[in-house]
Image (tube, rainbow, N blue to C red):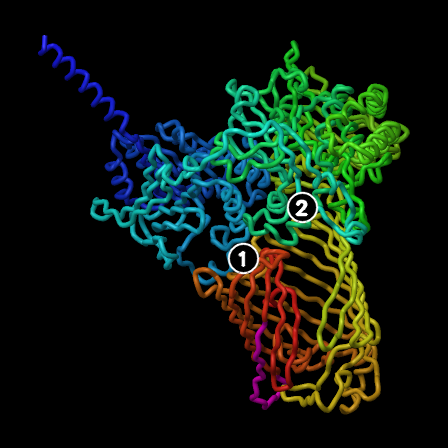
Amino acid sequence: MSSLKNLKRSILFFFLLTASIVLGQTNDTSIYLIGNTGTTNDTEVLDEIVKNSEKKENSILLLLGNSVNGKDKKEDFKKSIKPQLEKLSLFAGETYFIPGKNEWAINGYKGVQSIEKYIQKNSTSKFYPDDGEAIKHKDLSENIVLITVDTQWFLEDWDEDSYINDESEIKNRTLFFLEFENRIKKAHGKTILVALHHPIETNTKQGLLSNVGGVSSDDFQNKEYRKLRNRLKTIAQAASNIIFISGKDENLQYIDKGIPQIISGAVGKTKNVRNGSEGDFGLAQNGYAKLEISNEGVVVVKFYTVENRISTEVFKSTIFKGDENDTEASNIFKEEFPKTQSASIYTNEAVAKSSFYKTIWGKHYRDFYGTDVNVPVVLLDTLMGGLFPIKKGGGQQSKSLRLEDKNGKQFVMRAIKKSTTKFLQANLFPDTYIDNSLDDTTIDKFLSDFYTTSNPYGAFAIGKLSSAIGVNHTNPVLYYIPKQKTLGTFNDDFGDELYMIEEHVGSTQVGLKSFGNPKKILSTADILQEIHKSGKSVVDEPSYIKARLFDMLLGDWDRHEDQWRWAYFDNEDGTAYCTPIPRDRDQAFSKYDGLLISFLTRSIPALRKMQSYDEEIRSVKWLASSPYHLDLMLINSSGWEEWEKQAQYIQENLIDDDIEKAFEGFPPEIRGEVINEIKEKLKGRRSNLVKIAKAYYEYLNKFKIIVGTQKTDKFTITRLPNGETSIKIDRKDIGLLNRTFSHDVTKEIWVYGLDGKDTFVVDGEGDNLIKIRIVGGKKNDTYDFKNTKKVKLYDYKSKKNTIVNKKSKKWLVDDYEINNYDHKKVKHNFSQILPLFGVNPDDGVKLGVLNNFSYFGLQRNGFTYRHSISAAYYTGNSGYDMFYKGEFSNIFHKWNFGVEGKYTSPNFAQNFFGFGNETNYDKDEVELDFNRISIREWNAAVSLIWRGKNGGSFYFKPLIESFEVQNVVDRFVNVLPENATLFEKQTYVGSEVNYTFKNKNDLAYPTMGLDAGITLGYKAVIDGGNEDASFGYIKPHIAINHKLNKSGSLVFATKLGGEAILGDDFELYHAAQLGGGENLRGYRKERFIGNYSMFQSTDLRLQIGDFNSGIIPTKYGVTAGFDYGRVWLENDTSNKWHNSLGGSFWISGLETFTLNAGYYSSADGGIISFVLGFSY
């Protein structure tokens, strides 16, 4: 019996021991990293990875781009891939190929898809991102997310690949960044691996031109590459455990500048690595990297070199320490709270403003923000059966948290207090992470105060108002939510303030009555895809028009596309329709009072949508500017009758009693005179709603966009009498659109065919025709224009199209932006008025104004056309000048046409000290005016202009100009030997060409940059003076910025330039000149003139530190500067070189601007300068 007991104990012990061993196993994930495997025939490194992958591990291999030879053509890539696939068949785990530059070098977009298909057909390996997309994510485990990014897709010239994005849902680079941000948000709390070919950080040594210029798209300093990596870094800062993994550089590196970066691309020829910061690693030797990730979140990177088929560990670093870093468990939170809590949004100190301040900046709803309101206190784990946080959310202003109940239904917890940081990050600094550096600065306080223009509790009245007229809505409830155990790690950013909790408008809330009892809930992006897929899904236009009129009734201007979700319903016949669910009602009943705020919201275009709530709408156009592109796209079939019907429905069904009951949703503490005023204004606006609807209908229909489907559609455009045009869209037996437009209302229509082999027929005669622009799309489209008046087609030149009438007006170019539909691309214009100000010893104070006007139509090269007009007055010489510059896009494809002109008053001045390198000047003996000459000048020019995306530009400019020097007594110019032609009015014609390349990594404080260019020109006199006079000229320059230390706090900057006048028949105003801020900074402007000039200016710039100025975060530093230069005349015997020496103190704010004050001395004395930025 005893032996039986012992046997039982032994068996029990065995099972317990086995269980403890199993439970103690970590099941770590091992991820091997390597790139450039297609660039060499040496497979030693890949062989080692395969050999070292062990069956017991959760092994993964990431091949980080350039898995093919970039010199391969089309089908030849198989020679590179096939041997790798054979070896990878032995790898003990999953393998993922990620595209790089070489994959794209093989027939572009189609080539990448061919490689993907071959790999997936001939192996178990994955090719990510797949299906033509730029981003793909994969859950490698419960706690590890892999996000793969095709960076070469971003860097490609899309105009050179007419098939790019054919299969992709991401059609532009803006959507790419939004998608990347969404992926990061969804992976909150997990270890995120971002695998991409191009690194966001590198210490690889490069040549000088690549380092400072970024001429190639592959260069780390390339403009597009820099935009890509800066934006990715900024977005990634929102995640705590994120690692970037790349394989482009042919070496091994580990860099941590806030975001860990691993580079593993050393399989053949290697590139040297410069020394990095402490803790970084770099080695130019063949090998690979390996990540080991435990279930507890510990992440370790190891680097191995491979030699003679032996792997040797050469570096190891723990990137994340996992759960041991989580100190949340040690935090103690209260578990008992009062049932209610009195709290305000802002402190009394924050809302206390003087009478003068309120007069200038307004009263707004500041009192609401400083008033304590008594609201329920909730513990999330007891609310609605228990709510638990799952991820952060929020838009451009709100700070929010997604919650989920035990049944999977999701809710949103949104802070009533807006986030200034989120607003600035989204709108002003998308490429620069600003963390909390703006806290307690003037700009932070100003924005916080500006937020008081919005009614903080308006959302709590809107649910009942919506119900009264049948508009879908959420049901927010106001709570005080303390920091608590349930919030976990989110306690750092949430808790101890007022929040609203409402249903998350998403798939977990289908069937909710206030959402319309939908079967599905889709985003705006999803709805657009459904609408354009086949035409079987439509937006219910009456319900959308009613919702938009309701927006206007509320004064809610912030209705961009993410503020909408869509209730989706299937019909029995296979079609579907959707109705809108508005969300985030933050801007209803806003108040923009105060003298300055009122002025700014009227004068600055971007702020004109911000209008104080009143019975009348100041401008329906600007109030509706945020959702304007959505309205254009979604409202196609409805005429004025439907708009009028919906406006009248709201007037009849939103009765006074509904309004009174709705405003009972406001906290009792703030109900009073202000709320009563809002109610009366709401009733007054309700009375004006038909008039408001009419005004917006006419504006919305002045310009229209009609869009087909991804299938084969037939567009029939019929010109009718009385200025009417009928547009019908049919697909097989389905009628998609049948509407008649009148020229009295509609002046221009853009028609997009999208995908499919579409047919466009234009017939009928008609009169007073509407301008039609037709964009065919990707496939072989047929254009049958029986009437070619006021209609023009746009399509790809490299693709086959059928144009029946050869007289049809057309523009066939391989231009991605023109030939592809972007729902945010609409016709609009933009005007901006700016002050002009400057100070220098020669001009005195410059006071002026500049007006920039830009127009954006269908055909753009940056813009359709733009105008700049300026006028300035100079106190130093009582002169003035006026300037005009216009530019019109695509006179030829990618070439713009420029027009410019200038006029100066007769007393507009430049300096003259005589010709030559050793002219005399004693500032103590003569006044400043003595060396000034007064010139009346006018000029005009036309030009052809080209600009490249990497920083290059070119122009060819024929010109005409006239100079008339004024004969003013007691000036230096009068003591010279008599010049028979100087004081005659002289008119020149000529031309010049210029090429410039300019690329700097930072406009405020550049640490790497190149600015190089050359101008060649010729001018000849045609009237006045010596009519046989002519001359040529050459003006080259090159400027370099290069950091001297790792941080970039010490920068070497230099500029070398000059000018050569070819010929002797030129006047002083055309001579080669030196002096002033552009070269010899210690001398007056035009101090030395001659036939030839040369100079070099050099700065050593040091950033001393940074501080919070109380206004904005500020960096500051000093420069030491030295210039030298001289001019030459024909047969010049002078050997003298002039120099100036000095320095400056500079401050830079938010990496956007620099103020620079300096002093430079020379043989003539010294010059004080004030400039914006650095001159080179």
Q: Residue at x 55, y 32 (%)?
A: 168
Q: Residue at x 86, y 36 (%)?
A: 616
Give neighbour class at mark 1: few <14, some 14-19, many 20+ (Cα, 10 Å).
many
Q: Residue furthest right?
A: 722
SS at circle 1: loop
Q: Any magenta on residue 1140?
A: yes
Q: What is the three-letter code of the residue carrying label 1?
A: Asn
**Image: magenta residue range:** 1128-1144
Residue picked out by circle 2: 448
Q: x%, y% of residue 16?
A: 22, 20
Residue 192 appears in the figure: no
Q: What is the three-letter code of the residue carrying label 2?
A: Ser
Give neighbour class at mark 2: few <14, some 14-19, many 20+ (Cα, 10 Å).
some
Q: Nearest the camera: 310 or 1166?
A: 1166
Q: Nearest the camera: 718 or 997?
A: 997
In this rendering, which labeled residue sits more in front, label 1 or label 2? Answer: 2
Q: Are marks 1 and 2 in contact (CB under 8 Å)?
A: no
Quadrant where the C terminus lies? bottom right
Quadrant where the N terminus lies? top left
SS at circle 2: helix
Which comes before the other along the chain, label 1 or label 2? 2
Using the image, tell me which numbered label, if any, was put on residue 897: none
Q: CA distance from mark 1 to mark 2?
A: 31 Å
Residue picked out by circle 1: 1001
Q: x%, y% of residue 1101?
A: 52, 68
Q: Is residue 700 above or below residue 843?
A: above
Q: Any magenta on residue 230?
A: no
Q: x%, y% of residue 1043?
A: 47, 64
Q: x%, y% of residue 87?
A: 28, 34
Q: Is residue 415 above or below residue 832?
A: above
Q: Residue at x 37, y 59 (%)?
A: 274
